[in-house]
Image: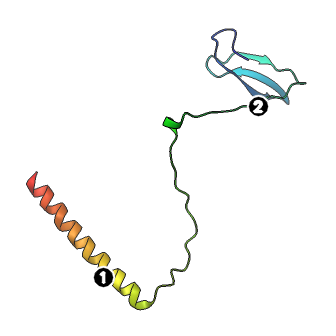
Amino acid sequence: MFCPRCGSVMVPTRKDGSIYLKCSKCGYEVKGDESKKYNIRHQVEPSKRVLTAVASEARESGLTPEEREMLREYYEVFLEEFERSEGEESESD
């Protein structure tokens, strides 16, 4: 149903135990038909969809102590190189 005042979509809301149709734009309300079932559906255009990541609980990595140490060293070297490259970029600006 559309609002008779402004033409926007009327959204079903519950108020005092009854169903009302309320305009999402101007606030106009009308009592809804209790014998009807109201559903709200939203369809988002594919161009407006946003991809999100899902966080999950961390699991055991199964790395040996030697592998962990090697990764730690690689990480330290990476950070040093990153800081050096950032410093060179800021000096050239």
Residue 58, position as x, y percentages in the image: 55, 72
Name the residue located 9 percent from the left edge and 57 percent from the top edge. 91
Name the residue located 30 percent from the left edge and 78 percent from the top edge. 74
C-alpha span from label 1 to label 2: 57 Å
- Eyeballing the image, is 61 above or below 16? below
> Which amino acid does the dot numbered 1 rest on?
Glu
Name the residue located 40 percent from the left edge and 85 percent from the top edge. 68
Name the residue located 19 percent from the left edge and 61 percent from the top edge. 86
Q: How are the residues colored?
A: rainbow
In the image, taking residue 67 as reference, residue 33 lies left or right, namely: right
Label 2: few (<14), some or many (≥20) within 10 Å? few
Which residue is farthest front?
A: 46
The residue that disc 1 covers is 73
Residue 66, position as x, y percentages in the image: 39, 91
Look at the numbered disc 2 and give the secondary structure of its residue: loop
Which residue is farthest left?
A: 92
In the image, taking residue 13 as reference, residue 47 lies left or right, namely: left
Choose the circle earlier in sequence order: 1 or 2.
2
- Eyeballing the image, is 77 above or below 16? below
Which of the 4 quarters of the picture holds residue 29?
Answer: top right
In-front residue for pair 72/67: 67
Give the position of the N terminus as an image quadrant: top right
Look at the numbered disc 1 and give the secondary structure of its residue: helix
Which residue is farthest right?
A: 35
> Which amino acid does the dot numbered 2 rest on?
Asn
Residue 39, numbered label: 2
Residue 89, position as x, y percentages in the image: 14, 57
The number of callouts visible is: 2
In the image, taking residue 78 as reference, residue 33 lies left or right, namely: right
